[in-house]
């Protein structure tokens, strides 16, 4: 087991690779990262580049007795997707304390991994929107089609879902967020530098802005974004605004320009 101390994380901090990464093997069955929070804040994690044929899981725990392991009752949230899918954690508000991230292999072969972490906003009842493009699903290349997803949800321990799609020609794109049971919003993103992070210095209205559009009608009203987009790769991020579980339906509609 390898243990890495990240020290105290301040609010609105992002730790991208190559700073964090490792390898899980038969002789090193889990890696542990420890960090401190001195105040409540939103927390985001993306575990990616897991090898084909390997299945890694990640758990986040509040180490109350500071014995450097996640004991019964200390686990905050776990991500255990099947196969080599990315493991994603987005928590609306972590209280101040000593935390552990435990990465282990549930099955399969040895694997390298990359780990991205961020803190986004103070946990004062509002959500700090994740700035990590922790992809949930890849819609592939879209041409003159609709992609619909029904009965998805976000909540206080899963505050954002990210969907990727690619265009091979200039197209008119419409993103619809409907069926909301509480207030959630949607934004359309282009990761121009391919670092899987929505960079703080690259918001729309500034050079090379990565956030292309935002739908935030408020309450349970439908949100939508309509744009003409060139060929390239794009991301749709659905994120929690109100607290608690929020069910939603998502539609991405693509037509020739």
Image: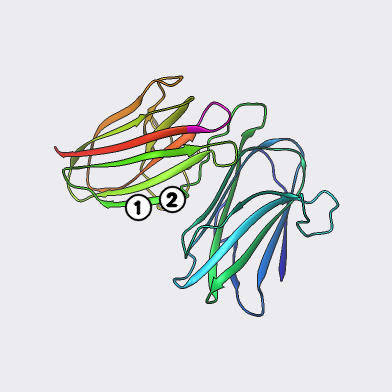
Q: Is residue 7 above or below residue 227?
A: below
Which class describes the residues within 10 Å of circle 2: few (<14), some (14-19), or many (20+)? many
Front one among 133 and 82: 82
x 28%, y 38%: residue: 252
Q: Is residue 134 visible?
A: yes
Front one among 210 and 89: 89
Label 2 and label 1: CA atoms lie apart by: 7 Å
Are discs 2 and 1 less than 8 Å apart at CB? yes
The magenta segment: 240-246
| Mark linked to residue 49 | none
On screen, residue 166 versus residue 255, left or right, reads right
Which class describes the residues within 10 Å of circle 1: few (<14), some (14-19), or many (20+)? few
On screen, residue 105 versus residue 1, left or right, reads left
Residue placed furthest toward the front: 151
Q: Could you say where residue 94 lies in the image, as x and y percent from the top left?
A: 69, 39
Check disc 2 and report its element: helix, strand or loop.
loop
Q: Main secondary structure of the magenta part?
A: loop
Residue placed furthest toward the bottom: 27
Q: Could you say where residue 241 lies in the image, as x and y percent from the top left?
A: 52, 28
Q: Which residue, given by chain and number where applicable, does mark 2 sit on? A: 135
Q: Is residue 201 visible?
A: no
Q: Is residue 243 magenta?
A: yes
Residue 42 in which image quadrant: top right
Q: Is residue 243 above or below residue 101?
A: above
Q: Which residue, given by chain and number where applicable, does mark 1 sit on? A: 138
């Amino acid at each position: 087991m390898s243990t890495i101390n990240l020290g105290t994380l301040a609010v609105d901090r992002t730790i991208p690779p190559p700073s964090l990464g490792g390898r899980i093997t038969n002789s090193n069955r889990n890696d542990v990262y420890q960090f401190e929070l001195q105040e409540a804040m939103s927390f985001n994690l993306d575990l990616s580049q897991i090898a084909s044929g390997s299945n890694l899981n990640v758990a986040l725990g509040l180490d109350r007795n500071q014995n450097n392991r996640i004991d019964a009752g200390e686990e905050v949230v776990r991500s255990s997707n099947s196969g080599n899918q990315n493991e994603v954690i987005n928590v609306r508000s972590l209280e101040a304390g000593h935390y552990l991230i435990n990465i282990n292999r549930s099955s399969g072969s040895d694997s390298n991994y990359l780990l991205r972490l961020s803190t986004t906003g103070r946990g004062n009842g509002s959500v700090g929107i994740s700035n990590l493009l922790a992809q949930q699903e890849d819609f592939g290349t879209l041409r003159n089609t609709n992609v619909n997803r029904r009965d998805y949800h976000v909540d206080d321990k899963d505050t954002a879902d990210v969907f990727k799609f690619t265009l091979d020609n200039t197209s008119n794109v419409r993103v619809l967020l409907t069926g909301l049971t509480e207030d959630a919003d949607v934004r359309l993103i282009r990761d121009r530098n391919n670092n899987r992070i929505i960079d703080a210095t690259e918001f729309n209205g500034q050079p090379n802005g990565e956030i292309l559009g935002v739908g935030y009608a408020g309450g349970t009203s439908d949100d939508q974004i309509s744009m003409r987009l060139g060929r390239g790769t794009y991301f749709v991020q659905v994120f929690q605004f109100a607290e608690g579980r929020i069910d939603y339906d998502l539609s991405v509609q693509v037509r020739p320009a």
